[in-house]
Image (tube, rainbow, N blue to C red):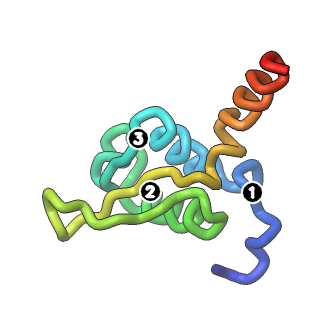
Amino acid sequence: MMAGTDSEDLEDLPPSAKLVFKVLEYNGSLTQKGIVEESMLSARTVRYALERLEDIGVVDEDVYFADARQNLYQLNGAAAEFTGEDAENDACRADAD
């Protein structure tokens, strides 16, 4: 992790990184090529956005078994705090009480 990124979160990232986050949130796991196609951003911009999202710990990179030359990117559990899922779950728990 790069120095100074510990306190950084999604709100501090450039718009391209936020767009990549939303593309992954909406579509699930994608390759970099798939993110480029969905976001209409350049491959270089997507690479930079993915690096930034990995730096704050919300994106995981896995092997894409259909083509080992590519990687598969997906949001991880830490991304839930930015997607609103935790807030929805908390509201459901409060209703149940």
Look at the numbered disc 1 and give the secondary structure of its residue.
Answer: loop
- Residue bearing the label numbered 3: 28
Q: Give the quadrant of the N terminus.
A: bottom right
Which residue is nearer to you in this view: 19 or 85? Answer: 85
Indicate whether 71 appears above or below 1.
Answer: above
Three-letter residue code for mark 3:
Gly
Q: Earlier in the sequence, mark 1 or mark 2?
A: 1
Q: Residues within 10 Å of mark 2 (few under 14, many from 20)?
A: many
- Residue bearing the label numbered 2: 46
**Residue 9: image tag:** 1
Three-letter residue code for mark 2:
Val
Q: Give the quadrant of the C terminus.
A: top right
Indicate whether 18 appears above or below 94.
Answer: below
Three-letter residue code for mark 1:
Asp
Cα–Cα gap, marks 1 and 2:
18 Å
Residue at x 41%, y 65% (from the top left corner): 61
Q: Earlier in the sequence, mark 3 or mark 2?
A: 3
User: Can you tell which of label 3 and label 2 is closer to the viewer?
Assistant: 3
Look at the numbered disc 3 and give the secondary structure of its residue.
Answer: loop
